[in-house]
């Protein structure tokens, strides 16, 4: 009877866990729909603004003028420092979401060190912060206020900080390591160069289906310098914000898949424990019947 009681307690615990994982799966599914709407809604804007900057810059150069902006040009006097922003989650139970991002982050950091550069590591998310603390690696900045529902105002402050550091010569570039959202069924860790903006604009313009050279001459009002002065920082902020919302939707997908797998495993374990309980109860009943029959035979 003791074995049967233990099995009953285990089965009850498994059922409670199943309820929790099922609820977490439903919550992640609900958040995923909202995050997906944001990610797919802003992606065309970010892509187009990158194409516009590259196209306008080439058009201005074709007319004989020069576009001079600190966020577009490569550094002549380099500080040797590159900012690496690693985007992870504040909460766990998301499968291999954080593991893949952190592995790519370490590869990126080692590649920079192999090139003789000094990586300045900035980490968003409690899981990433705990990981780098475990490795005893210094972090230039940590952020836990953005979470799985990024707000543009929070990311804007972060983008302005990196743009100021780049303009002042404190860093030579900015790389963002995050979980890239490709489709609902495919997400991959990726490292994207945000600063200098010329790399981002070139990457956008040379994609399949985009023009490789500008053929349109523009008339500007106001003049190109003033126009690009507003447009270029907006592109940096939008690109960084896109990285955060893609990471957010990828996190919800990973959590949804992980919780579904946990719910299915709990269901299988519950069925297995039910079978074990039935066998233990059957064995107990057989033992009791044997004892009863033995007593009857002894009375004859």
Image: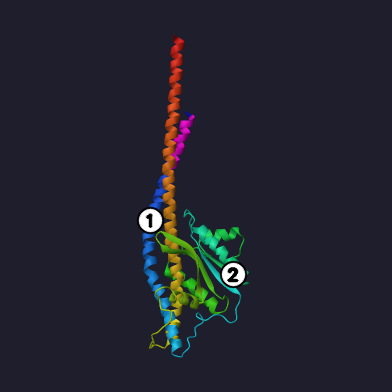
Q: Quadrant of the C terminus?
A: top left
Q: Which residue corresponds to mark 1?
A: 29
Q: Which residue corresponds to mark 2?
A: 119
Give coordinates of residue 92: x percent, y percent: 49, 55
Q: Quadrant of residue 239?
A: bottom left
Q: Are marks 1 and 2 in contact (CB under 8 Å)?
A: no
Query: In the displayed structure, would residue 163 be above or below residue 182?
Result: below
The color scheme shown is rainbow
Q: Residues within 10 Å of mark 2 (few under 14, many from 20)?
A: many
Q: Quadrant of residue 226?
A: bottom left
- The magenta segment: 2-14
Query: In the displayed structure, would residue 252 be above or below residue 78?
Result: above
Pick the residue in front: 100 or 171.
Answer: 100
Give coordinates of residue 103: x percent, y percent: 55, 60
- Residue 99: in sight, yes or no? yes
Give coordinates of residue 68: x percent, y percent: 49, 85
Give coordinates of residue 40: x percent, y percent: 38, 66
Pick the residue in front: 14 or 78.
Answer: 78
Determine the secondary structure under disc 1: helix
Determine the secondary structure under disc 2: strand
Real-space Cα distance between discs 1 and 2? 36 Å
Q: Is residue 154 left or right of residue 122?
A: left
Query: In the displayed structure, would residue 160 be above or below residue 224?
Result: above
| Residue at point 58%, 69% (across, down) | 120
């Amino acid at each position: 009877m003791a074995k049967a009681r233990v099995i009953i307690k285990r089965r009850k615990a498994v059922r409670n866990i199943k309820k929790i994982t099922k609820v977490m799966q439903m919550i992640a599914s609900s958040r995923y729909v909202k995050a997906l709407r944001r990610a797919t809604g802003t992606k065309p804007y970010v892509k187009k603004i990158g194409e516009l900057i590259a196209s306008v810059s080439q058009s201005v150069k074709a007319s004989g003028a020069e576009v001079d902006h600190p966020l577009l040009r490569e550094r002549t006097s380099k500080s040797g420092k590159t900012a690496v922003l690693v985007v992870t989650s504040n909460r766990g139970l998301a499968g291999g979401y954080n593991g893949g991002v952190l592995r790519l982050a370490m590869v990126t950091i080692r590649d920079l060190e192999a090139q003789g550069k000094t990586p300045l590591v900035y980490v968003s998310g409690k899981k990433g912060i705990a990981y780098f603390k475990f490795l005893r690696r210094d972090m230039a900045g940590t952020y836990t206020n953005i979470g799985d529902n990024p707000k543009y105002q929070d990311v804007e402050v972060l983008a302005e900080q990196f743009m100021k550091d780049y303009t002042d010569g404190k860093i030579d570039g900015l790389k963002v390591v995050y979980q890239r959202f490709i489709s609902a069924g495919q997400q991959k860790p990726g490292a994207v160069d945000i600063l200098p903006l010329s790399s981002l604009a070139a990457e956008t313009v040379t994609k399949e289906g985009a023009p490789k050279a500008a053929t349109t001459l523009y008339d500007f009002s106001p003049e190109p310098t003033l126009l690009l002065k507003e447009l270029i920082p907006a592109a940096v902020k939008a690109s960084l914000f896109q990285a955060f919302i893609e990471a957010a939707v990828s996190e919800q997908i990973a959590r949804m898949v992980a919780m579904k797998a946990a719910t299915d495993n709990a269901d299988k374990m519950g069925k297995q424990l039910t079978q074990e309980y039935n066998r233990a109860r059957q064995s107990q009943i057989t033992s009791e019947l044997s004892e009863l029959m033995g007593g009857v035979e002894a009375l004859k």
